[in-house]
Amino acid sequence: MIRVGIVGVGNIASMLVQSIEYYKRSGDCRGLIHRVIGGYRVSDIRIVYAIDVSERKVGRDLSEAIFAEPNLVPKLVDLGETGVIVRMGKVLDGVANHMAEDFKPAKIGEPTKEELAKELKENEVDVIVNLLPVGSYEASRFYAEAAAEAGASFINCIPEFIASGNEGYPKLFEKRKATLLGDDIKGQLGSTIVHRALASLIAMRGCEIIESYQLNVGGNTDFKNMLDQSRLYSKKVSKTAAVTSTQERPESLIGRVYAGPSGYIEFLGNTKVSYMYIKALGFMGLPVTIDLKLTVDDKAMATAILVDVIRLSKALVERGIYGAPDWASAPYFKHPPKLAKSDYGAMLVLYEKLSEVGISIEPKHFYTF
């Protein structure tokens, strides 16, 4: 069993909790990237600890809190009580001013870093998952440090540069014999990985991108939170670098590639609509233009990746692999410690590295082009 704690009981948390129960009951493996990682199946994941700051969620059983407003993920699986009561967290910068009404922080005492670390140890948490809103710079670091102090691994799903930054967090987790995976989780077939795949294909076929944009709109609290442009710097850096890194001369595209959230449309709910445009030069310098529209369930896309990296994190620790190995994050995150030119290549490197240390992963996705 993998004992997991979640920071932020929002829409991804709702999808994660329900998906674990779905795959446990159904025995169905459709939709999963990998059925087994290190001997673990999705049904081996157990949520044992949860943190939020909303008065609608704190103090409630996790099975109720995941459906509290403003969450939008519908009830997909009937859940009984989990016995996990959502704990009050530290607000810091986790709630933007314009989101105060949506998140309504509870007016109760906030924990210290030491108190949280103690609780994580008492609950024997293996992995902490950071699901805070974009722009939570201070709060993300607070929880990362609490996890490290407790000796728990940390998965950073948001665009704060914890694993890929220069603040020493990888060494901190290595010292604590835990893993650090991140930053900014990709979707299973989300806008970033599709944009990257097209950009990689263009480079592989001898063409050159001269300009591109990716515009994303959605109707959940993630998109509403990102209306505050001051919270978007790292998000735009993460998504743009994910695309430009596929090219031979990424620096030549500075100012000519844009990728990021572009609007909040409430009635879209959890649906994300992405519009992608690429203009490239091909044979004899003649132009090629690609326009693409992608529509996905935003949270399903992220959770498909999350159930992989939770199992991967646990398996790495069991083999004595600590800190932030770049090859473990590269296939799964937009801004890993080392950006890969190709997602397919990044997955092949992952398979090679896991084979070297004796970690099984099934199935392995090999393709002949």
Image (tube, rainbow, N blue to C red):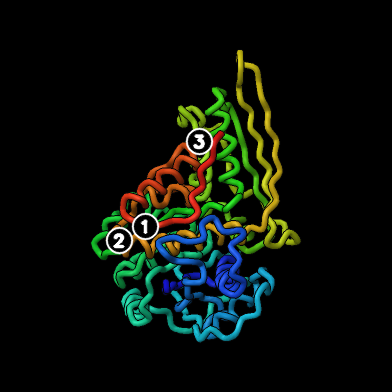
Residue 244 appears in the figure: yes
Question: SS for tag 2?
Answer: loop
| Type of the residue with mark 1 | Ile
In this rendering, the count of numbered labels is 3
Whether residue 84 is situated above or below residue 102 in the rendered picture: below
Residue lying at the far right in this picture: please name it: 267
Residue 100 appears in the figure: no
Q: Residue at x 42, y 42 (%)?
A: 339
Which labelled disc corresponds to residue 96? none
Which labelled disc corresponds to residue 319? 2
Q: Position of residue 101 (x, y in %)?
A: 62, 72
Give me the C-alpha separation between circle 2 and circle 1.
8 Å
| Type of the residue with mark 3 | Thr
Give me the C-alpha separation between circle 2 and circle 3.
34 Å
Q: Are marks 2 and 1 in contact (CB under 8 Å)?
A: yes
Tell which circle, 2 or 3, labels the residue nearer the N-terminal end: 3
Question: SS for tag 3?
Answer: helix
**Observer-nearest residue: 107 or 132?**
132
Q: Are marks 2 and 3 in contact (CB under 8 Å)?
A: no
**Observer-nearest residue: 128 or 308?**
308
Q: Residue at x 30, y 61 (%)?
A: 319
Question: SS for tag 1?
Answer: loop
Horizontally, is 231 left or right of 152 in the view?
right
Residue of label 3: 244
Q: Disc 2 vs disc 1: which is toward the camera?
A: 1
Which quadrant does the N terminus fall into?
Answer: bottom left
